[in-house]
Amino acid sequence: PHRIYTRDPNAPHMNESGKAACRLPAGHPEAFFEAFANVYRFAYDSMIARAADFRGPLKLYATPYTWLLARGDGAAVCDWSVDLRGVFDGVPSIHCESRALKERLDRHFAKFTPKIIAPPRRKRRAA
């Protein structure tokens, strides 16, 4: 016998994860927006789970592009207009990819708890 599975959140075959992922019955054009909401929700859940296990120094990159080049290791600040102090609560230290980024963080925070580390200054060669 054949079975037809629909994406109805009230269907008997749906588990909790399935119910959370489809809040609208099949055939609604609003489902396009719901699909993107699911992507963002699951990405957010994943980031929160990863952050809960965070113990080491945070590698901070100046742009999302440089963060992607580092294969998503660490973080990048996407919005400098918000107060970032709460974002870095519990972070033991921040390792900046450049001195310019460290200086920008120093300017951004009036009082900042973690130790901020940048690469050492390069010695100038004698001419």
Image (cartoon, rainbow, N blue to C red):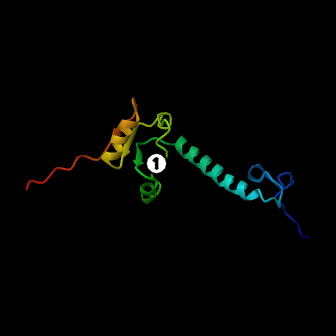
Q: Secondary structure at mark 1?
A: strand
Q: Residue at x 36, y 44 (%)?
A: 95
Image height check: is 93 above or below 18? above
Q: Residue at x 77, y 56 (%)?
A: 30
Q: Position of residue 100 (x, y in %)?
A: 32, 46
127 left or right, relative to 49: left
Q: Nearer the viewer, residue 100 or 70?
A: 100
Instruction: Name the residue at the bottom extreme.
Output: 1
Quarter occupied by the N terminus: bottom right
Q: Residue at x 88, y 66 (%)?
A: 3
Image height check: is 77 above or below 83? below
Q: How many marks?
A: 1
Instruction: Name the residue at the top extreme.
Output: 111
For badge 1, the amino acid type reads Ala
* Image quadrant assignment for residue 107: top left
Instruction: Name the residue at the left extreme.
Output: 127
**Within-10-Å neighbours for mark 1: few <14, some 14–19, many 20+:** some
Quarter occupied by the C terminus: bottom left
Q: Residue at x 31, y 44 (%)?
A: 118
Q: Position of residue 47 (x, y in %)?
A: 56, 47
Q: Position of residue 114 (x, y in %)?
A: 39, 34
Q: Position of residue 90 (x, y in %)?
A: 47, 34
- Which residue is tagged 1? 75
